[in-house]
Amino acid sequence: MKKYKFLLFFFLTNSWLIFSQTSIPSELMNKPRTGDLYKVKDKNIESVVVSETNYLKNESYINKWIFNYSADTIIRGKLFKNEELKSNFEYVLDDNKRIIEMKSIFFSQYVKNDKQHVKYDINDNIKVLNFLDDNLKIKSKMVVEMDSLHSPIKITSVNFNNEIQAIETANYNYKSNTYNYKIYNSNNEIVLNKTEYYNKDFIIEKNEFGDITKMFWPLSSNKVIITFEYKYDKKGNWIKRVEKNFSNNSESISTVAKRNINYKD
C-alpha cells in the first residue's frame, strides 16, 4: 500500500511531466485511461474547465485544467495547481481523440527544459514519441513496443544520433499478475532488475455510459479497489466524478473532479 500511495502521489503531482515522458510503469498506470479529462462524447464543444481536488494523507490540493477546443482536433489550454500556473499546452488529436502531437511550456522549479514538443506515431503494437527541437528536428525519441494485450514489453530511448541511451523491458506472467522489469543503460548494463505487480484484468465494472465504475489499481499486489461515482449532463458527459479507494477494510475519497462543459449550441 505504501508503494501505491507513493506512485499515486508522484502521478498526481507530476502529471504534466508523466504525460510527455513515458516508462513501463507509467504506461501501465495510464492503461485505465481515467485521466483523459478532456474527452467528451460530443463534437460541439467550445471549452471544458476541470477542477480536481486531490486528497492525500497529509495534504490536499486542487488541479485545474482549462481546455479550449479551437477545432475538432485541436485543444489549447492551461494547467494550474492551487491557482499556480504549471503549464500551457496544445494538443492535436486523431479521429479516436488520442493525442498525436503536444506542445507544452512548463512552469516549475523541477523542470530543466521548460518547453517540450512531442509528436506521436501510433500503430497497433508500436508507439513512438518523437521529441522535437525549436527547428522541428528530432532531438530524441522513445519507441514503445507492446504485446497483443497492448502492454508495453520494451521501451527504447535514443538520442539525436540514433544512439541507444536506455532500454526498459517487461516480461509478463499474466497468471500470477506479475512482470519482470529490467532497465539497461547505454552500455547495455542492467541497472534495475525486479519483479512488479500488474493485473491485466483491472476493470471490474462499467456503467451504461461506458465509464469505469469499479476497478483494481492495476499495479497493486493487495487488491486495492477504486470506485467512481458520476453525475452526468443531458448529453451524457460526466460533470462530476468522485473517486474512492478501498483497501485494508478502509474506504477513502482520493479525488473529486468537476467539469464545466461549454457547448457551441
Image (cartoon, rainbow, N blue to C red):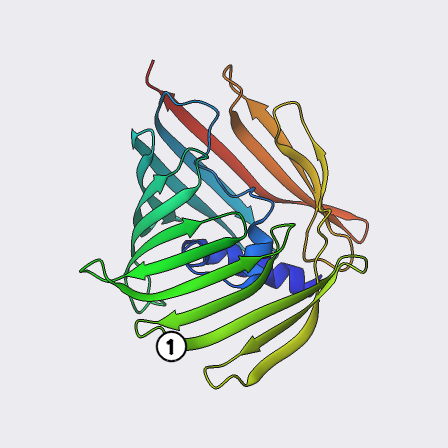
Where does residue 38 sit, x and y in percent of width and height? 43, 36
Count the labels in the image. Answer: 1
| Residue, far left | 135
Viewer can see residue 58: no
- Of residues 225 and 51, which is closer to you in this image? 225
Q: Is residue 49 left or right of residue 168?
A: left
Where does residue 100 sit, x and y in percent of width and height? 38, 46
The residue under the point 61% across, 24% down is 209
The residue under the point 55% across, 56% down is 27
Q: Is residue 86 left or right of residue 57?
A: left
181 versus 262 height, above or below: below
Question: Which image quadrant: the C terminus?
Answer: top left
Where does residue 47 sit, x and y in percent of width and height? 34, 29
Viewer can see residue 252: yes
Residue annotated with mark 1: 163
The residue under the point 50% across, 17% down is 235
Q: SS for tag 1?
A: loop
- Of residues 71 and 13, which is closer to you in this image? 71
Three-letter code for the amino acid on which mark 1 is drawn: Glu
Where does residue 67 sit, x and y in percent of width and height? 35, 36
**Quadrant position of residue 118:** bottom left
Q: Is residue 235 left or right of residue 6?
A: left
- Of residues 217 and 50, which is closer to you in this image? 217
- How many neighbours does mark 1 have within 10 angstroms: few (below 14), some (14-19), or many (20 or more)? few
Question: Which image quadrant: the N terminus?
Answer: bottom right
135 versus 264 height, above or below: below
112 versus 63 height, above or below: below
